[in-house]
Image: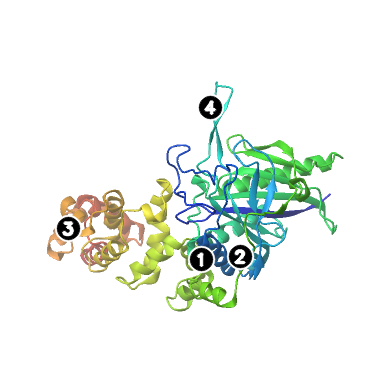
Amino acid sequence: MEYGIVIGLEVHAELKTKSKIFCGCSNEFGGQPNTHVCPICLGMPGVLPVLNKSVLEFAMKAGMAINCEISRYSKFDRKNYFYPDLPKAYQISQFDLPICKDGYIDIDVEGETKRIRVNRIHMEEDAGKLVHTEGYGSSAVDVNRCGVPLIEIVSEADMRSPQEAYEYLTKLKSILEYTEVSDCKMQEGSLRCDANISLRPKGQEEFGIRAELKNMNSFKGVLKGLEYEVKRQTEILESGGEVVQETRRWDDEKGVTSSMRGKEEAHDYRYFPDPDLVPIEVDEEWIQRIKDELPELPDVRKKRLIEEDGLPEYDAGVITASKGLAVFYDECMKGYHNSKVVSNWIMGELSMYLNENNMEIDECKIAPAQLAEMLKLIDNGTISGKIAKTVFAEMFASGKDPEVIIKEKGLVQISDEGELAKIVEEVIANNPKSVEDYHNGKEKAVGFLVGQIMKATRGKANPALVNKLLKEKM
């Protein structure tokens, strides 16, 4: 039997505010365990939380960027459950009246645009974390993360393949980065994803029994986890079994999911309005002010790069998927005006070195103006494209200006016709067979001779001039 896949995602994004959601403690990542804490985020009896205004505005900004309706009236609720890293034994969240609802994100799937609906975005506080040490038989609790502000972005179950889920996540991350409400660093836990997935026989309207996947700390992990779950659930259904509704953990090393616990429903949490926090009322003037602060978003920027800069749609999509790359591109274009050449270097050498070093663009030592200067040096014949790759590698490692690297390493391209003519004559004299092959119509012989000249000049010869002189002298 053929089965259809149904996927919905719940994404938690930590907000990039200076302080926590209900107190003045630092929201900075890391720090010594249990140092970014106070009686409020520790849940001590008698303390009163106060909402951080920036959290509300960041949530509204994210909602607007995801095409949500902003609720004029919302409230906080207590979500009751006990975990060792949640001192209050309840989490302050939003249940039936969230700050944002009814949004959508458009994704590109196999050349077509598909709209994924967003059910809601709500604000809540984060829990702490458990630190497990092998061999001790116990765990330590770090509550620094308690009270860190989160928004949870809940999609509808509109995704029909793991790849669609991957594209949705990529687009969502890009939007959050552009609005600067979150740094979206999955390695630091500031962007986390839970996925609900079920299968149903093709043609059936009713959803199947779903499993929830947790502990996926990368987009590739989400993709692989969902692919594994499709296979697991298919095998269960094919053998006549029933999928159990549960929460499952993804093991990235083993490439499998394993059962954690039964899946909780909303009623299991016994929600009720938080008596210590007043409802939130947002007026039209406030909403308009936040809307006016929205930056150029990924889809708008992509359209600009295509229409104004003449970039191919693919290039524009790759560059605008990351705000950092898009800013780097725009800055580079201020000093060098060939958009396709800039795009090729960003998508090629720059992205390669960033990936190899597991770095973000804001950690890169190369400034956009330096790349622009290097591209000018290629155009004016100071260096060849091949030498430029050597220069770029040194720029990436040291952050030095291209002219300094060229001077230090003696990489200036040889474009003196008289100097090159002597080398060309020597190569021709030393390779009579290749010259004969060329005269017999074998164009590949030219490539061999050019290679010999480049070898003799340690890659510094001007390739265009070399080809011209070779053909003239033969």
Mark 2 vs 1, N-terminal side: 2
Name the residue at 32% across, 72% down: 334
Position of residue 94 relative to residue 126, above or below, is below
Position of residue 470 relative to residue 257, above or below, is below
Disc 1 residue type (three-letter): Gly
SS of the residue at dot 2? strand
Compute the Cα span from label 2 to label 1.
Answer: 10 Å
Which quarter shows the C terminus? bottom left
Judge from the rendering whether residue 144 lies leftward or rightward of residue 370; answer left or right: right
The reply to whether callout 2 and callout 1 are in contact (CB within 8 Å) is yes
Nearer mark to the viewer, of 3 and 4: 4
Disc 4 residue type (three-letter): Thr
Residue 71 visible in the current orientation: no
SS of the residue at dot 1? helix
The residue under label 1 is 317
Name the residue at 61% across, 65% down: 108
The residue under label 2 is 108
The reply to whether callout 4 and callout 2 are in contact (CB within 8 Å) is no
The residue under label 4 is 133
Disc 2 residue type (three-letter): Asp
Compute the Cα span from label 2 to label 3.
Answer: 55 Å
As drawn, the residue found furthest toward the right would be 240
